[in-house]
Image: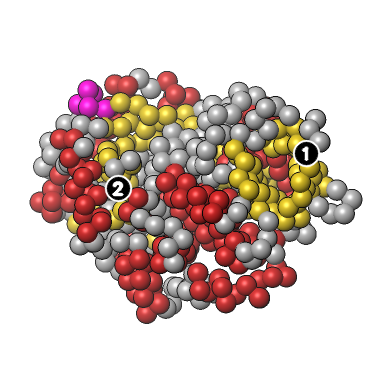
Amino acid sequence: MSNRQTETDVILIGAGIMSATLGTLLKELVPDWKITVFEKLASAGEESSNEWNNAGTGHAALCELNYTSQKADGSIDISKAVKVNEQFQDSMQFWSYLVTRKLITQPQDFIMPLPHMSLVQGKDNIDFLRKRFEAMSANPLFHGMEFSEDPEILKTWIPLIMNGRPSNEPIAATRMNAGTDVNFGALTRMLFQHLKQKNVDIRYRHSVDDLKRTSDGKWELKVRNESGKTELHTAKFVFIGGGGGSLPLLQKSGIPEGKHIGGFPISGLFMVCNNPEVVAQHHAKVYGKAKVGAPPMSVPHLDTRFIDNKKSLLFGPFAGFSPKFLKTGSMFDLIGSVKPNNVLTMLAAGAKNLSLTKYLIQQVMLSKEKRMEELREFIPNAKSEDWGMLVAGQRVQVIKDTEAGGKGTLQFGTEVVSAADGSVAALLGASPGASTAVSVMIEVIHKCFPQHVKAWEPKLKEMIPSYGAPLLNNPELIKHIHTSTSQALGLNDDTPSQRDKRNKASVL
């Protein structure tokens, strides 16, 4: 045990996009607060936030069909899509604030304009997509959405997908040109570089092993440093933002709100194409419909990506199962998370999700050629030699007891669990995750610092102009936000920096 003991105002566990966002928000709101970050890996953004570990879709609900459900009367419920889109607009506004004040620079290194599309086949699915298009395009948040079932138009939108497809196959798509590709790994690293300049104490290769409440209401953390010695660190507020590693630490905190909660880990694989001739034929993120029994995170999609100044294509994800809660985690993570207070919840979830478990096992067993068959549903002429495999990040879906779903309900989404007194908060769950980081961290601020929110309101409105003003019934504000964020982030098609990067990437 090291004698080293430090006291700070805020401790952030995990150097991912969530801690980066919360730390940056707090440094703008209260610059004199002392913040310490602990990350077990050697650098920021290496786990769930890493650009190769998530799809970088910039989830704005423009193309994800699982955010719009069909009701019993046949109408389309777009309420979840509206919520996710509003959350993404918060992120866009905050990133714009950081860029315009030169707190981060070169936005083209983390965000690029890219059409978002939904693609379906078969009469029933086309009817659904048309109804979805009618409901969404009538909403000012989704102004500019296009729909087509004309093969000639679709050939201009998605030539790689349409080439070699039977001409009599019913197919339709929607397109939103206002979509983006976001490199959350690059953004995370930018934000931590900014925090370092703001004198935030960032300690890599430091693992938080335990945390407990002290007699004066603070939190004491046992932290193992890179040499293996244990340090003690105390703080008034702790944020547990360690991706899949958050659940074990939440359990160790002992707060009542963390009981009766479990986690279900899902791993993923992507197929990746770096053949420039193939890559040049596709410029969009195209989402299809999930197969029956598949989790929402397994919705098949073909994505153009801009990573390290190189343009590539990713297809997937193919779901899988691993008991690890992190890509760099332990094979004992899942069994270690089963506690007396959540064992019934976990067992109930297992009984309810036998079909999901079967699906995941089937996915694990797929050969490359079977995966190529699924890819060819998107790209009929796909050649096996053009595509390799990439292991994506681990996601841990929340399991908890709910009124609607009963005991052991599997949750798909992002969730904040915080102590009643606001002294500790943990982030659990998966998609839309990183895309909604700003609104989720604003939620943390509201839950954990309610006594400060009124005083912080002017600054929050400066950083996020729509703060406190729902966008849904405010088309003028929506238009202003779309225009100002596109300009600040260089998302207009004729922006020189974007054009240069696209041209450079296309020839690599």
The residue that appears at 68% across and 56% down in the rendered structure is 34
How many residues crowd around disc 1 within 10 Å: few (fewer than 14), some, or many (20 or more)? few
Percent across and percent down for residue 396 are 57, 38
Which residue in the rendered view is the most extreme toward the right?
A: 215
In terms of secondary structure, where does tag 2 sit?
strand
**Mark nearer the N terminus (1 vs 2):** 1
For the question of whether residue 321 can be seen, the reply is: yes
Chain part drawn in magenta? 383-387
Residue at image mark 1: 4
Determine whether 237 is above or below 6 in the image. below
Image x and y of residue 507, in percent: 17, 40
- In the displayed structure, 212 sits above or below 448; it is above
Judged left or right of residue 15, residue 281 is left
Label 1 amino acid?
Answer: Arg
Image point 35% across, 50% down: which residue?
Answer: 109
Residue in front for this viewpoint, 267 or 365: 267
